[in-house]
Image (cartoon, rainbow, N blue to C red):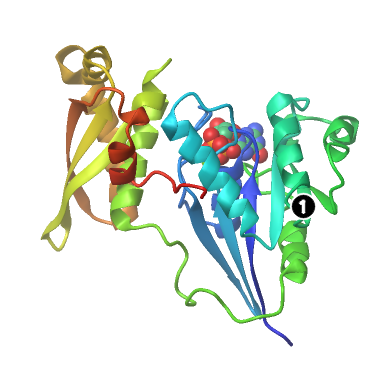
Amino acid sequence: MEYRAGFVALVGRPNVGKSTLLNSLLGRKIAIATKKPQTTRNRIVGVLHRPGAQVVLVDTPGLHQPRHKLGERMNSAARVSAKDADLVWHIADVSRPPNAEDHAVAAFCRQLAIPTWIILNKADLVSRVKDRWGPYRTLMDYRNYFVVSAAQKTGLDPLIEATIAAMPIGSPYYPEDMVTDQSEDFYVGEVIREQVLESTREEIPYSVAVIVDERTARRPDLTYIRATVLVERDGQKAILIGAGGRMLKDIGQRARMQLQEYYGHQVYLDLWVKTRERWRNQDGWLRRLGYGVSEH
Ligand SMILES: Nc1nc2c(ncn2[C@@H]2O[C@H](COP(=O)(O)OP(=O)(O)OP(=O)(O)O)[C@@H](O)[C@H]2O)c(=O)[nH]1
Ligand SMILES: [Mg+2]
């Protein structure tokens, strides 16, 4: 049997379930997923290993109308990933009719000249998917379509099988034991950011970034982590800390539980909040935070 290996880009508007699908396919959480749109800010690689095949799944930020440099870089990361792929999955939320953003994603996919499939996600939310898929399946000339529920893990096997068959013949790109290319610090920062997103509203979730300043094994069974949560305004800092430090403490508590599960031992998490005005529009900060690449 010939070995197949290739790249699949997961693209779509924000909040359709791209990161949830990535995690479900890998059977492991590598990307954070929340109810808030624009959760993912980077390209996140997850490698699916199968006998005779390797599928490199590339989760991307939701394509949207950007309002600052961070948003532009997020969109660029998604576009660059799609351009490099052997196959594009346009992920859609079948429980809602296509909106302008879905149309824009389809228009982008159309000009790529890379085989594109429409993946109709959140099938668990509708009783008859067939009544809903029409407007999506005609957005462009998709080569194939799949109905899945990333949350309930249904419809995934046929999708994977067909994807493997669509991969080019070639050698593996990553070693067998490699599931993601993210650094540990990046993942730790994302787990903290996920809890901030879950706990805050309005502009705050979008104005937050997390930097891991220190991560040390203090004992074989205890990891010490010191991290800074950046916000754009002092008012946001006050809300995030909360009365008597309550909010930050709760966020830290929940992030710590998740990290303890990840490490399989005790974690001491030391969280600090700092204001850096308009960091989302500053190239220096965006670079330092590892957000995106320039498209050119
Ligand atoms: N009911 C249901 N909810 C889902 C499903 N897949 C994802 N969700 C939910 O949809 C929300 C968005 O999921 P994400 O995976 O973060 O979506 P995304 O496309 O990665 O979003 P961005 O990173 O913002 O572009 C979360 O609340 C998920 O739990 C699904 O199959 N069914
Ligand atoms: Mg995402």
Q: x, y (%) of residue 167?
A: 72, 70
Q: x, y (%) of residue 257?
A: 30, 42
Ligand 1 found in image quarter: top right
Crowdedness of circle 1 by 10 Å Cα count: few (<14), some, many (20+)? Answer: many
Kindly state the secondary structure of the residue where label 1 is placed: strand
**Residue most extreme to the front:** 296
Residue 92 falls left or right of residue 269: right
Q: Can residue 27 be seen in this view?
A: yes
Q: x, y (%) of residue 25?
A: 60, 56
Front position in the image: 201 or 61: 61
Instruction: Name the residue located 89 percent from the left edge and 34 percent from the top edge.
Output: 134
Give the quarter of the image for residue 156.
Answer: bottom right
Give the quarter of the image for residue 173.
Answer: bottom right
Tag 1 residue: 116
Q: x, y (%) of residue 239?
A: 26, 14
Give the quarter of the image for residue 190.
Answer: top left
Residue 287 falls left or right of residue 223: right
- Asked whether mark 1 and ligand 1 are closer than 8 Å, the reply comes as no
**Residue most extreme to the bottom:** 1
Front position in the image: 45 or 141: 141
Please tell me whether residue 2 is drawn above or below residue 91 in the rendered image: below
Q: Can residue 121 be seen in this view?
A: no
Please tell me whether residue 150 is drawn above or below residue 276 in the rendered image: below
Please tell me whether residue 15 is drawn above or below residue 149 in the rendered image: above
Kind of residue at disc 1 = Thr
